[in-house]
Image: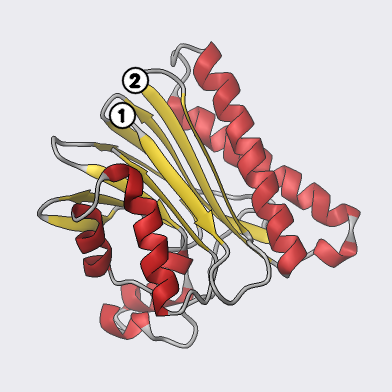
Amino acid sequence: MDVYGKSDIGTVRSANQDDIKYRKINDQVLWVVVCDGMGGVSGGEIASSIAVDEISNEFDDKLQTSNLETDIKSIMILAISNANRKIREAAQEDPQYKNMGTTVVALVLEGRTAHIVSLGDSRAYVIDNSGINQITVDHSVVQELVDKGEITKTEAVSYPQRNIITKALGTNPDAEPDYIDYHLRSGESILMCTDGLTNELSDEEIHSIVISNIPCEIPDKLIEEANNRRGADNITAAFII
């Protein structure tokens, strides 16, 4: 197993509110954390940085010392809870950051089992030569409208409120992330990304780039193409194979 990741400011924004960290602990375990901050330029940067650092530290501590005897889901949920508390404490200390928060999608890959937690609209996909499948669910206004049948998935792509999220770290005392575990089949890989990528490229376009490039170049190629379109937001991508 290997992981390749990159974050880019894009072509429009003055600062990068995305953040990413990843580490391969041993031949059987690696982790990845991807966040997209919000709440003004400084607030977004601070929130995503706090979340990535807190979750990363928790993963490094627990995944190396527990020998995975502790339930991975519990480790991940605790990391999310701690990050949420840290962001809220930082916001309370400085009124200008009172509305800051961040999306998060975090992965612990144990062998071929992917453990994933998510809040917001940063995503995880499973990809193989035959197709691409989003395995996280967006916490967003447009996703709720799609679920209710009020708009179609096609309409959601250009819907005016598509960037409004309904869950995030730091915006609520009780951050309850989605948790899934997925067993990767032969030939399947995982892509994690922020909406700076998915707002510019369709799932089909992402799939085409992934299967046409070697793994270590995939984040760069995805970001390059997103910037060629508009690059209207920060862009972060991590590819795990």
| Three-letter code, disc 1 | Met
| Three-letter code, disc 2 | Gln
Residue 229 image position (x, y, % from top left): 39, 78
Q: Which quadrant of the structure image shows residue 204?
A: bottom left
Residue 115 image position (x, y, % from top left): 38, 36
Discs 2, 1 touching: Cβ within 8 Å: yes
Q: Is residue 78 left or right of residue 185?
A: right
Residue at screen point 19% across, 53% down: 211
Relative to the observer, which residue lies in front, 150 or 63?
Answer: 63
Residue 65 position (above or below residue 37) = above
Residue 31 image position (x, y, % from top left): 45, 33
* Front position among marks 2 and 1: 1
Residue 52 position (above or below residue 231) = above
SS state under label 1: loop
Residue 124 visible, this angle: no
Q: Which quadrant of the structure image shows residue 9?
A: bottom right
Residue at screen point 38% across, 79% down: 145
Mark 2 crowdedness (10 Å alpha carbons): few <14, some 14-19, many ≥20? few
Q: Which residue is mark 1?
A: 1
Residue 190 image position (x, y, % from top left): 30, 45
Residue at screen point 63% across, 50% down: 174
SS state under label 2: loop
Q: Which residue is mark 2?
A: 28
Q: Is residue 127 left or right of residue 119?
A: left
Residue at screen point 73% across, 70% down: 40
Residue 212 position (above or below residue 38) = above
Residue 151 visible, this angle: yes
Mark 1 crowdedness (10 Å alpha carbons): few <14, some 14-19, many ≥20? some
Q: Is residue 60 left or right of residue 171?
A: left
Number of marks in the rendered image = 2
